Amino acid sequence: MSKFPFLTLLVTLPLLGALILAFFPRSAGELAKRFALVWTLVVFALTVGAWLAFKAGGDRFQLKDDYPWIPQWGVRFTFEVDGIALVMVALIGLLVPLIVVASWKTVEALDGNRSVPAYFALLLALQGMMIGVFAASDVLLFYVFFEAMLVPMYFLIGSYGSHQRRQYAAVKFFLYSLVGGLFMLAAVIGLWVLGGNTFDWHTLVEAEFTTWAERWMFLGFFVAFAIKAPFFPFHTWLPDAGSAAPAPAAALLVAVMDKVGTFGILRYCLSLFPNASKYFAPLAIALALVGIIYGALLAVGQNDLKRLVSYTSIAHFGFIGIGIFAFTTQAGSGAVLYMLNHGLATGLLFLVVGFLVARRGSASIKDFGGAGKLVPWLSGVFFIAGMASLALPGTSPFVSEFLVLLGVFAVNKTVAVIATLGIVLAAAYVLWMYQRTMQGTLNPALNEVPAMKKDLSVRELAVVAPLIGLILFLGFYPKPVLDVINPAVQATFTQDLGVSDPAPKSEAKK
């Protein structure tokens, strides 16, 4: 066990904060905001402490906290992280305080009498449950957090969304994820029965299963993770949920919550079912490739800003998918780094879109046009977020995308070439989106909206500045993160999956 219970506190403190906020009266909205901000900053400080306590190049899993739970079933509260989980926990610790600040005026701007304390309680509850998903080392504990985190997001979409179809989107999101969770539950029960009556991840990694049992359990986990990510053709809930949710909650959904799917594939599908992972890899790569092209093409045709950004995420998750199932450490490290960088870039893009929608009162692209003339600073931040989303060199997503394509090219040139087409399409949908909203002739209707004449505020600058700083810093110097990621990826592919990188081709004789 670790000397200091970092992970236990990172899971329980947000949940405790949510419980306290649940008892705030509706009239205490301003106090609830300040409480949530201070509480999430404490969690962020603990996250920094956990990052510093983690020794890159040390043991694969660190910061272990272990407590008994249900001894009859061999279930324990076990939290520990490797480099892959740690970067996701760090992303949550960073983003949630920014989400709180970005949400400062969100609830008041909605129609109806909606509780401000309840909104921030849901954000804190979601934070604790997401950290629990990434930190859990017991398979049943992972499943509990995997399912439980649906509840706060369901209410954030259904109760606090501004879209008229928010309840439809919330139910669709919940049902898709719940159905996927049922497939996983069947596989979890199979693991316990066939794996020696235990849910301990380390024990199950060493267990041996028959070919058919392993393939069926792989599919149970993979379907749940493919829905959560989402991969094509399980993606249809995301555009609805992304467009209906409040922009800050949608940013958290696409930046972090969806990464549970790709993280689960790495931690559970590849490690627990290595032979089945190899068997189904061609299918997974095919689905990821379709997602890259299909998501990008649909993004190009969108007229709603929030739906457009949601569709871009489907394309981005396709890159993560081919990076994982290429089974090279270079592509794997690129995929994990992509998970982090996508969270930073798309989270920033969704937040900026939220600022624009709040000013205009509409997410429709046709309601903008030439807006950069009225809000030049906000337009500039929007441009940076767009360039990061299309992986412009100098931004952090470029590094991860380059590593993925380089690693994939080493084993399958055709897949790499087809995936590269997604980069061209990304440039099309991002530049067209920016041109239609910020450039060109000023839409006369914008002059009649007083809020559209208010440029980037101090509060909004406090939200976007850390994300822009990290995107640029990691774009030029990703080494601190790669040093943490690489050993975990190496262990996943070589120890658990049993694959090795292709040998470099020797130079042709002169």
Image (cartoon, rainbow, N blue to C red):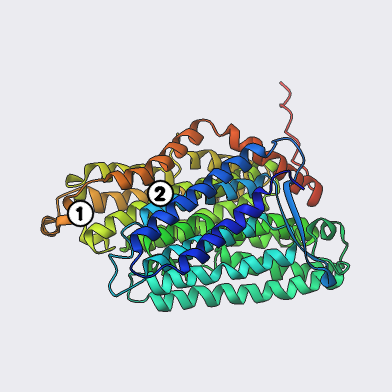
Q: Quadrant of the C terminus?
A: top right
Q: Nearer the viewer, residue 436 or 477?
A: 477
Q: Residue furthest top?
A: 510
Horizontal arrangement in the rendering, residue 469 relative to residue 500 (left or right): left
Residue at 60%, 77% in the rendered image: 179
Q: Nearer the viewer, residue 51 or 167?
A: 51
Res 410 → quadrant: top right
Instruction: State whether residue 439 is above or below residue 399.
Output: below
Estimate the x, y position of residue 153 in percent, counting from the top left.
Answer: 49, 68
Q: Please identify, in this view, whether the residue under mark 2 or under mark 1 is nearer the observer.
A: 2
Estimate the x, y position of residue 115 in percent, counting from the top left.
Answer: 37, 70
Q: How many marks?
A: 2
Give the spatial CA distance, label 2 vs label 1: 21 Å
Tell me the crowding category of disc 2: few under 14, some 14 to 19, or many 20 or more residues within 10 angstroms, Cα based.
many
Residue that mark 2 sits on: 348
Residue that mark 1 sits on: 369
Label annotation for residue 285 = none
Residue at 66%, 59% in the rendered image: 264
- The amino acid type found where label 2 is placed reads Leu
- The amino acid type found where label 1 is placed reads Gly
Instruction: State whether residue 186 is above or below residue 501.
Output: below
Inspect this view and state whether residue 342 appears.
yes
